[in-house]
Structures are given as C-alpha cells and as structure tokens.
Amino acid sequence: MPVDTTYKARLTKKECVAEGTMAFYFEKPYDFFFKPGQYVDVTLVNPEHTDDEGNIRSFSIASTPADPFLMLVTRMRDTAFKRSLDAMSSKNEILFEGPFGYFTLHHNAVKPAVLLAGGIGITPFVSMIRNAVRLKLAHHIYLFYSNRRPEDAAFLQVLKEAEKENPAFQLIPTMTEMNGAQQIWSGETGCIDDVMLDKYLPALRGPIYYIAGPPAMVAAMQQALAAGGVDRDDVISEDFVGY
C-alpha cells in the first residue's frame, strides 16, 4: 500500500482512559492495514479551533489490526488541536495518512522484547501486547510502564488482564509521584533505571529494547542501556512530545 494514501474516518465514540487522557475511536477503512506500533498522521477537517501549529498531528495506533475500529489516544491539553478533537461528535470525520514507522515487534522470538514506556508512550505498546496475546506469539515480553500516579496510567487494567492471558508477558508498572495520588499503590515506585531493570531482567544484554515516552525519559533510558553495555542496534525509540 502506498504510504501517501489518504483515508477518511468517522468518529464513533470517545472515552476517558486515565485522568486527563482520552481515547478516540474511529471507523477503520476496510482497506487500511498496519502493524502494531505504527502511527498515522491525522488532519482535522474544519476544526472549531485553530492556531499557528496547524491541524495535523501524529498518533500511534493503540488498537490492534484485528479490531474493527481505529483507536487513537492522547493527553488532553489546552491547545487548539486538542480542543477541536474533544469537541468532535459522532458525525465528524478526520483525514489520516499512513501507516508510518518501524517501531514494530521484531520477528525472532528467541530474543526477548523489553518495552520501556513513559506516560502516553504506552499507546504503541498496548497495540503490540494485545496483538501478541491474540496471536499467542512466543516472544517473552517485559513492559516497564512509568507514570506519576495510578490515576495517570492509561490501560493499566487492560495490561493486567493481558498478563493473566499470556504467561510470556510480564508487566512492571511504576509510579514516580505517589504523594499526590488518591489510589493506593503497592507496586514499584520511582523512575525506571538500571537497578529496576536488573531486578526483573535475566540480563541487560540480549533483549531488543523499545522506548516510548517524553524526550527526557527516552534519553535517560538510552543512556542507562548504553552504560549497561546494551548494543545501540538493539535499542529502538520514539519520542512522544505533547502538543
């Protein structure tokens, strides 16, 4: 499929998936195919609000190829684009192009996959993990998922359910600012670092690493892995910048 294909999709529903985070569900065109981890460029059609940043943004696809819908997830901030997105109703449509990107699960199941997610960087991993469960992939997958508080952790329950369904998938969520949390938390706390990785991984060298999150988090993870002797060819990353 040519990467410059433009599709039209109608909004079917939207829901809050964490504090300040919304999921938008669109009808999936019958001829649109993608791999878990890829993204699309979304254009708003006649948006209610505009600014100098324009009407196009990139979104990782949070749904799986088997889902009958296209799910896009974002942190809601006070920007023209996101106000327009939030104001959309079921009669509204978007235009999107793609899929794009190579942030996809490797084929060699002998090598474990270590997924390092910060905040909204979880979106491509939700697609990867749900797809791995559905297809019963043999990959051993570790997901380290960092958020400030449990209230901010989108899809945490979905991921816990996936862990129950797939013995080869291990979820390690961690919270970095529990002082402001309303929910009780008994799991890991603090940022993902080499100490936390050493605690759960048999060895730092060997797996393929995928990093998705804010630029500072991605850079910190890259440095930690390099310091641990991980080959940079075994590290794939994507920065998630707020709009």
Image (spheres, rainbow, N blue to C red):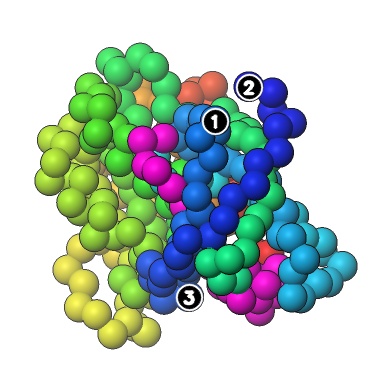
87 to 168, vertically: above or below: below
Disc number for residue 208? none
- Foreground mark, 3 or 2? 2
* Residue sitting at x 46%, y 67%: 14
The reply, left or right, for residue 187 in relation to residue 70 is left
The type of residue carrying mark 3 is Gly
Q: Secondary structure at mark 3?
A: loop
How far apart are labels 3 and 2 at the CA level? Answer: 35 Å
The type of residue carrying mark 2 is Met
The type of residue carrying mark 1 is Asp
When asked about the image quadrant of residue 142, the answer is top left
Inspect this view and state whether residue 218 appears. Answer: no
- Residue 40: where, in percent of width, then height? 62, 43
Q: Which residue is mark 2?
A: 1
The reply, left or right, for residue 165 in relation to residue 119 is left
Q: Which residue is mark 3?
A: 20
Q: Secondary structure at mark 1?
A: loop
From which residue to which does the magenta span run? 65-87
- Residue 62: where, in percent of width, then height? 44, 48
Magenta stretch: residue 70 in it? Answer: yes
How far apart are labels 3 and 1 at the CA level? Answer: 32 Å
Q: Which residue is mark 1?
A: 31
Magenta stretch: residue 235 in it? Answer: no
* Residue sitting at x 67%, y 72%: 84
